[in-house]
Amino acid sequence: MTGIDVALAGLGVAFLLGLIRTAIGPTVADRAVGADVCLFTLVAVFGLMGVRSGSEMFLDVVLVATLLGFLATVALARLVGKRGDQ
């Protein structure tokens, strides 16, 4: 078992915790944080898979997913700011 395998296991736990926060979050902001944790955990998994395989294709996936996650977070923050946290 390599260090990458240990990191992937830790990221799996982080992803599950993010899913739990997304499912039971009492507010929209809690659900947004949980979804961000899930997304960026997946980005880290893709990055580690790229390191493991030595493929540069994963870098493109990481860049696109990070950009989309950032834009979604900004859009949700604007929506919550206008509506208030419910």
Image (cartoon, helix red, strand yellow):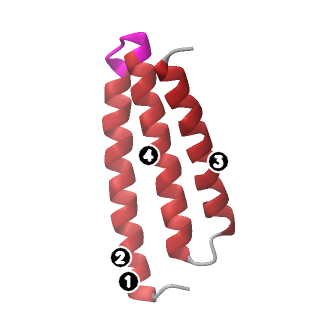
Work out how far the residue at label 2 is from the one at label 3, CA to CA, in angstroms: 27 Å
Q: Secondary structure at mark 1?
A: helix
Q: Secondary structure at mark 2?
A: helix
Indicate which label's residue lies in the foreground, 1 or 4. 4
Q: Residue at x 63, y 71 (%)?
A: 25
Q: CA distance from mark 2 to mark 4?
A: 20 Å
Residue 77 point in image, percent of width and height: 38, 73
Residue 79 horizontal/vertical position (percent):
41, 77
Residue at coordinates 46% horizontally, 55% vertically from top-left?
A: 36
Q: CA distance from mark 4 to mark 3?
A: 13 Å
* Residue 5 is one of the magenta-drawn residues: no
Residue for badge 1: 81
Location of mark 3 (residue): 16
Q: Residues within 10 Å of mark 1 (few under 14, many from 20)?
A: few
Q: Are marks 1 and 2 in contact (CB under 8 Å)?
A: yes
Residue range corresponding to the magenta coloring:
52-57
